Amino acid sequence: MKKIVLGVSASISAYKAVEIVRLLKKKGVWVKVLMTKDATRFVSPLTFEVVSEEKVIVDQFEDANNREVEHIKLAREADLFLIAPASLDLIGKLSTGIADSFLSLFFFAFEKKVLIAPAMNSSMFKHPVNQRNIESLKEIGVEFLEPDSGSLACGEEGIGRLPEPEFIVERVIFETEEKFFSGKKIIVTGGPTREKLDDFRFISNPSSGKTGYYLAKKARDFGGEVLFISGKTCFNSLWGVNYVEIESAEEMKREVKKGISNADILIMSAAVADFKPSEYRRGKIKKDEVSSSMEIKLERTPDILKEISGDKKKGQIFVGFSAQDNKKVEEAERKLKEKKLDLIVLNNIMEKRGGFESEENRVILIFNDGEVRKTDFILKEELAEIILRAIYEKWIKGIK
């Protein structure tokens, strides 16, 4: 279990720290909260104790009878120290060696990764003294999350907002994951493709792109250099990931071909449309141009994996997906061999809890050595981790 210590200093955005704790707990992370005395004016320690299920520490002399030196013991056990929000006052004290609270005392005892998320008025954040203090902490290895821009508590607009809890938690998970894909270049495809009939109509499918998104995200967390090639989805691009948005199968093929020669791992999780209109019309086909019915001739889109597999290099790992309206293992095994895959992920798109647009999926992992692994219904984010860990254990671990 990952162990995170969260420091909370005096800021109106301290309420967001409660959500940070909740999200970390949801991911199975143990969280211990340290607060400055002034921070308790904004959020009660009891609130953090309820959400974290751990005692909150405010006063370094609170338990004088404790035989263990608590800040030292905690510093040895924790994996990362996150300070969010970090006030101008606290940043100044840390940069000049002032330890007048348990939180600041812990900072000087902690020898691992420290992540600080400042939150303050724009003028305060940009002030030369504050910037100097930030730079001095960066010089000793402390990492800072750039504050967001927008409406501030003072009513002004500008930089200084605490980043959203989801982003902070994503960064914490990244910092604490094992980097077993370090030095590996990974291409992940995701989302649907669109095959145009005219400029306003297209053939596609209801893929949400969640599986590809989570694969790219976790591959990044595990230390990979990730190129994420995706059709249009509702997801924002991922920080730390090279993102290329495409529309058609032809565009996806072109982008995959650009990067495949340098890639160590290719994961084709995109829901590529199998067919496209034979003719494309610029503009919009008007209703009065068509009688009561209209015939649309279709042709096959490129089988990207099949084409790419012909140039597969020794040591490259190729992973494909087989979305079927049944669970015919024989069909997936045929594709595995035909496309020179190392692993194929088979799922039934007709299952109500799985398939397109769902939060969950149930799949069968079929490896090129004949091994078969089955999952129950699990979240797609969990599935992404299972697939990536399988790749590591099956091939990368042996290579290293």
Image (cartoon, grey):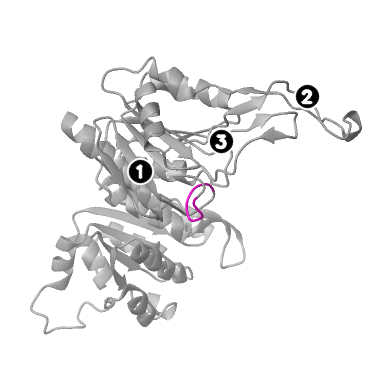
Q: Circle 1 is placed at which residue position?
A: 364
Q: Split into 4 quadrants, where in the image is the N terminus?
A: bottom left
Q: CA distance from mark 1 to mark 2?
A: 42 Å
Q: Is residue 261 left or right of residue 251?
A: left
Q: Position of residue 247 (x, y in %)?
A: 60, 31
Pick whichever, 29 or 67, lies toward us: 29
Q: Is residue 197 left or right of residue 39?
A: right
Q: Circle 3 is placed at which residue position?
A: 231
Pick whichever, 99 or 381, lies toward us: 381
Q: Give the vertical position of 352 relative to 286 (above or below).
A: below
Q: Position of residue 323 (x, y in %)?
A: 47, 39
Q: Which label sits on residue 383?
A: none
**Mark toward the viewer: 1 or 3:** 1
Q: Is residue 366 left or right of residue 111?
A: right
Q: Split into 4 quadrants, where in the image is the C terminus?
A: top left
Q: Residue at (59%, 44%) from the top-left corner?
A: 206
Residue at the farthest left position: 67
**Mark toward the viewer: 1 or 2:** 1
Residues marked 1 and 3 touching at CB (< 8 Å): no
Quarter of the image for residue 101 reads: bottom left
Quarter of the image for residue 2 reads: bottom left
Residue range in magenta is 351-356
Q: Position of residue 97 (x, y in %)?
A: 24, 61
Q: CA distance from mark 1 to mark 3?
A: 25 Å
